[in-house]
Amino acid sequence: MNRPYLFTSESVSEGHPDKVCDRISDMVVDTYLSNDPHSRVACETLATTNRVVLAGEVRGPSISLDQIISQVRDCIKDIGYEQNGFHWKNCKIDSFLHEQSEDIAMGVDANSNKDEGAGDQGIMFGYACKDTNTLMPAPIHYSHQILLKMADARKNKGVKELEPDSKSQVTMLYENGTPSKITSLVISTQHKPNLTPNDIKDIVKPYVYEAIPNHLLESLKDEDFYVNPTGNFVKGGPDGDSGLTGRKIIVDTYGGAAPHGGGAFSGKDPSKVDRSAAYAARYLAKNIVAADLANQCIIQLSYAIGISKPLSIYVNTNGTNKVDEKKIEKILPELFEIKQTYI
């Protein structure tokens, strides 16, 4: 797009209620896979005031309920929740994990006649562009970086005024298809009592300037830099707003700069192509952009449950390609093995 335009993306911190749930669900996946790399896991988590509930399907080694509960508490403690309404030591934890359906296992498992199949049908997207050195879109990249700096300050640098739950939002002006400057910035962060938005602004501002190149911030007016616009954010985390696994799928990908297939990532083992094929599609897109075949690239893959090979591969470079898109689509399966068995 050649005309100037504004584009906005948001991120959330590790202490956001939905991200607490993502973290716990992924812990369950890691626990099973570390004991048996062929484990199957689909774990959902709910978090609310001093309560965590796990549900889903597993197949693999015998792991005790006590071990799972202990590791849930470790996740919450590492994030930093020691509040009356959500405390790693005191919250009630229930697990309703049960055995995976035999019908699903029959379609997914490899045997002498077939490769391991995809764990479900669906479409997955990957994207890359030249906005940043990570080949990620600038608004979501810098939104992430702000919150990573704030979390590091809170956990490792003695900034005790900040609490775990926070969000960021970056609006970027694009000119000639390139990030030009940030026109507005929003940070909402949970904090200790008796602090004003201006107090919090003074605390977080250095981390914004650490996270974002100066040339993108030099035109940002103070009145367009919003910090805790509601005025107070003391009660937060799962005590302030319940969390669920998989509700931050746009934050987890490209901040709205590219399509999304709809499937979440967290809590799923690699047989679930919602996760593994989305990672593969991102890998393909990154390689196309890094090889300078295009300035940006969207990849779509599709799969059917029980079938290993993708049903379709789609490439869209939004007119930035230096090589014909049909050629790219044709050569990708020759250069990269994208059967579910291998990704």
Image (cartoon, rainbow, N blue to C red):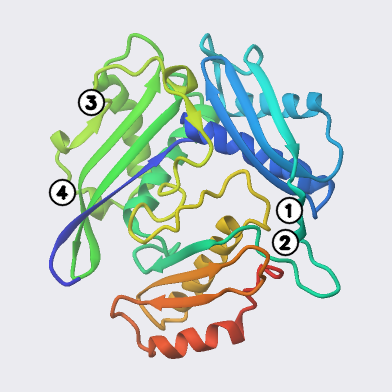
Query: Mark 1 = which residue?
Result: 103
Amino acid on which disc 1 is placed: Asp
Q: Residue at x 26, y 21 (%)?
A: 197
For the residues labelled 2 and 3, the Cα–Cα distance comes to 51 Å
Amino acid on which disc 4 is placed: Ser
Query: Mark 4 = which residue?
Result: 219
For the residues labelled 3 and 1, the Cα–Cα distance comes to 50 Å
For the residues labelled 3 and 4, the Cα–Cα distance comes to 21 Å
Foreground residue, 135 or 95?
95
Nearest-to-viewer mark from 3 and 1: 1
Q: Residue at x 78, y 61 (%)?
A: 109
Classify mark 2: helix, strand or loop. helix
Query: Mark 2 = which residue?
Result: 107
Q: Which circle's residue, 3 or 4, is located before the other in the chain?
A: 4
Foreground residue, 141 or 126?
126
Q: Tags 2 and 4 in contact by the CB under 8 Å rule? A: no
Q: Which circle's residue, 3 or 1, is located before the other in the chain?
A: 1
Query: Mark 3 = which residue?
Result: 229
